[in-house]
Image (cartoon, rainbow, N blue to C red):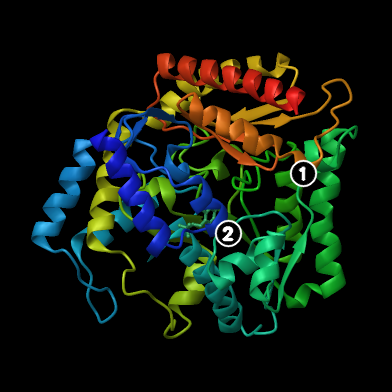
Amino acid sequence: MAEQQGSRRLQELDAAHHLHPFTDSQALHQKGTRVIERGEGVYLWDTDGHRILDGMAGLWCVNLGYGREELIEAADRQLRRLPYYNLFFQTTHPSATELAATLATLLPGDMQHLFFTGSGSECNDTVVRMVRHYWASQGQPERKVIISRHNAYHGSTLAGAALGGMKPMHAQGGLPLPDIVHIDQPYHFGEGQGRDPGEFGLERARQLEQKILELGPERVAAFIGEPIQGAGGVIIPPASYWPEIRRICKEYDILLVVDEVICGFGRTGHWFASEYYGLEPDLLCMAKGITSGYMPLGAVAVGRRVAEGLIGGGEFFHGFTYSGHPVACAVALANIEVMRRENIVGRVHDDIGPYLQRAWASLGDHPLVGETRGLGLVAALELVADQRDLRRFDSTVGAGLICREHCFEQGLVMRAVGDTMIISPPLVISHAEVDELITKARRALDLTHQTLIHN
Ligand SMILES: *Cc1c(COP(=O)(O)O)cnc(C)c1O
């Protein structure tokens, strides 16, 4: 009773004063917000006392789960010793420097330099500034165009949203910005049904080549992509896709930028998905899992070629007050230490990743499911109206949202991207917790089926 009054009060205050990200405010306040107040391991509790299995690790970030003492203590120690200092004017602090050096040991290829930001979006803004500054430093200032993909997600600042390929975001912001263009995504289920996946992957990759030739290679600065698209619906490209992208970037001397904000830090069973795909990017964005979400932090890793250009290119007029915030860096160092000590990446690769993927694939027999896919600890399934011909629901049905609601009622956070249901649980999830996730997901699919039949 007292609990419910507490929730009501917060919901009212929230409706009166708080504008939420990516939210239709009126619709939200008609339904009422859920107030999440506590987390432990893979579980969350709301102010009404419900326990919820967090199948999304917050927003793809709480990789070590909630309540990790090592991370809390690292923040506490750093707050007491040096809560803030900047990195602008001939100064550094130990946690930023140590973190840069530590990340350099984990990164693929020849990435030995790091630029810190406060978020994934800021990483992508930094990328735009960096690649253009780099090419200018090489005497090719006309190389400005960055090629991205429809339905990519690169954040919500102006540059992040412009690089991203989310049409509703572009429509509200006068986007994309000049000299940012998009090609089609390698989404086989959504856009290549009935096609051979290998051929489809090659065709989508070769759109990059066509676009470069159309624009003139001398105008193109970089290609950017998420190794696996996250917010777009966990889109895992056919195996033919990335090798072809890599070939094209090499052939036309285009910088390759990978946005590993979701894929980095063990999500795919590798420290970075670039290892899995055999990529040697020139720039690599990371955020989210870098601190397990305990503090906001992002970093752009820079390969040798671009680093040399930047180092020799005079002052780079770019940075944030909170670039390399000492508390965030201290938490990131503790996060990496725990990941190493507990062999989290190896466990995702050899044990819990395959375990989850097997269990997830078993949902494929459900009459609502047209496809299951996944890698490591990220996975998706496609809701379909007819399993035989893979016909999708009319978008007005809102099947994904109905399923998401049923998941929540079952005590499971699963996200809906249209009618694609996605999960990205904490990397520390146990076998028993995976079993619970799958049981709840299947029950939610059953309930969704019933709801859709009765409508
Ligand atoms: C979340 C995300 C971002 C944006 O990160 P923020 O910290 O929300 O700014 C950028 N790229 C990818 C791939 C993401 O998933």
Confirm or reject: label 2 Cβ below 8 Å from ligand 1. Answer: yes
Q: Rounded to the nearest whole Å, what is the CA distance between mark 2 and mark 1?
A: 27 Å
Residue 428 appears in the figure: yes
Mark 1 neighbour class, 10 Å CA radius: few under 14, some 14 to 19, many 20 or more: few
Q: Residue furthest left?
A: 80
Q: Which residue is mark 1?
A: 396
Q: Position of residue 54 (x, y in %)?
A: 43, 32
264 to the left or right of 328 = right
> In terms of image quadrants, where is residue 359?
top right
Across and down, in percent, residue 104 comes to 38, 53
Give the number of callouts.
2
Is residue 370 visible in the rendered image? The answer is: no
Q: Residues within 10 Å of mark 2 (few under 14, many from 20)?
A: many
Q: Is residue 191 above or below residue 138?
A: above
Q: Amino acid at mark 1?
A: Thr
Q: In the rendered structure, which amino acid carries the disc numbered 2?
A: His
Local secondary structure at mark 2 = loop
